[in-house]
Image (spheres, helix red, strand yellow):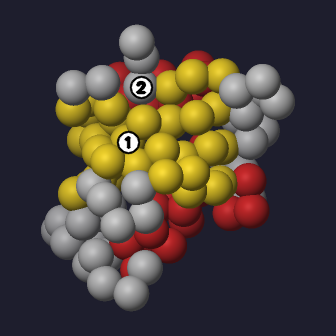
Amino acid sequence: MTWWSRAADGSLVLALHIQPGAKKTELAGLHGEALKIRLAAPPVDGKANAALVAFLAKTCGVSKSAVELVSGETSRAKRVRVRGVEPGVLERLAGEA
C-alpha cells in the first residue's frame, strides 16, 4: 500500500495525516502509510480543511476545484481526491519533505 492510489476516473486519491496549528504549512514526509502535511491554519470552523485544499492545489499545480476532501473532515486522517495531476509530481514532493 502506498499513500496514493489512482481512481477509476484517473484522479489520484491521497491518504494524508494532517497536523493543524503548525508554525508553517509544509509537507513533512511520510507518517505510516500517509503523507504528513503540517498546516499553519487552526482546526476551527473548517479553516484547516480550506488551507489543505489551497495548499494541495498550489503544490500540485491544479485549481482548488480539482481538489476534493473525500473523508476525514474532522479527523487528522484524511482522504483527498486530486484531479489532473500525475503521481510523479506528488512522489517528488514527498521525497523533498
Q: How crowded is mark 2: few (under 14 residues within 10 Å), some or many (20 or more)?
A: some
Of the 4 image quadrants, the one containing the C terminus is top left
Task: Give the numbered dot on residue 93.
Answer: none
Identified at 78% across, 24% down, the residue is 8
The residue labelled by disc 2 is: 3
34 horizontally vs 57: left or right: left
Q: Residue 73, percent across and down?
A: 43, 64
Q: Residue 41, percent across and down?
A: 31, 76
Q: Do the residues labelled 1 and 2 touch (CB within 8 Å)?
A: yes
- Three-letter residue code for mark 2: Trp
**Viewer-closest of 44 and 40:** 44
**Viewer-closest of 56 and 9:** 9
22 horizontally vs 12: left or right: left
The residue labelled by disc 1 is: 16
* Mark 2: secondary structure: loop
Q: Residue 61, percent across and down?
A: 67, 48
Identified at 55% across, 65% down, the residue is 54
Q: How crowded is mark 1: few (under 14 residues within 10 Å), some or many (20 or more)?
A: many
Instruction: Please report whichever mark, 1 or 2, sits nearer to the chain's N-terminal start.
Output: 2
Residue 76's place in the image compared with 93, above or below, is below
Identified at 30% across, 24% down, the residue is 33
